[in-house]
Image: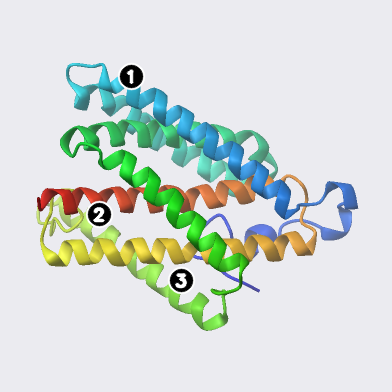
Amino acid sequence: MIRTANPALNERTFGNFDLTAASPSNVMTLQGTVNKTAILLALLVLAAGFVVHAVSQATDMAAAAMPWIAGGAIIGFILALVTIFVQKAAPFTAPLYALAEGAFLGGLSAVVNAQFPGVAVQAVGCTFGVFAVMLTLYMTRIVQPTRKFMIGVVAATAGICLFYFVEIILNLFGVGTGLLAFNNTSPLSIGISVVVVIIAALNLVLDFGFIESQAQRGAPKYMEWFAGFGLLVTLVWLYLEILRLLAKLQSRD
């Protein structure tokens, strides 16, 4: 069984249904998952675009963006938890999650882009580019989620999560390293961002493999929305890390 570091796409989640209860016409398919993922991405982009436009019109962009950033993050987190624990609700909660994350990313992108002009558009392009490359590498079987590959990526992702957690705790006490700051131009900070982007991209391969294996098992139709939600979680993380990396690189100019 393929494992991923994605909290949404795991064996426990996809094992909570009776495969014998699904009829042939009501099972998860790869094409269906692609369609649902496309819908979720479209909703996210539309919401982000709306928020970017709204924030850009404000005199104080930071103040205007904060409600979108905070609200989108909190609502998105709640919807993510509901989706993970109540998979049957995914056809309803996944689109709402996409809209909430779009609001969050739109607000954040507007603020960062004001400080580093053009970086948000570059990050969007790079994110979709990385997604296309990793999907191509997976579909052509150039890169496959073997056991060693899986263990390495999951372990690396866990290490990154631990680093983020420690950094957040240190920041609360005013002793953070600042390595995650968007304007940190130190070689170590940039190097960490490069590694994180690579690990986030490799997580897509595990997600692709897990989704394909579950479609072959005949998971219920509603899991197409859930799988699309899981992919969106990884893509949001990837975009944030690419945005951070590009901002750091632009700060060096």
Q: Is residue 70 left or right of residue 9?
A: left
Question: Residue 108: in sight, yes or no?
Answer: yes
- How would you rate the neighbour count of disc 1 (Cα within 10 Å): few for under 14, some for 14-19, many for 20 or more? some
For image coordinates 49% across by 31% down, the residue present is 99
- Mark 2 to mark 1 CA distance (whole Å): 25 Å
For image coordinates 67% across by 43% down, the residue present is 35
The dot on residue 54 is: 1
- How would you rate the neighbour count of disc 2 (Cα within 10 Å): few for under 14, some for 14-19, many for 20 or more? many
Choose mark 2 or mark 3, whichever is in front: 2
Choose mark 1 or mark 3, whichever is in front: 1
* Residue corresponding to mark 2: 245
- How would you rate the neighbour count of disc 3 (Cα within 10 Å): few for under 14, some for 14-19, many for 20 or more? many
x and y percent of residue 218 in the render? 80, 59
* Residue corresponding to mark 3: 154
For image coordinates 45% across by 41% down, the residue present is 77
Amino acid type, residue under disc 2 in the picture:
Leu
For image coordinates 37% across by 65% down, the residue present is 198
Give the structural element (helix, strand or loop) at label 2: helix
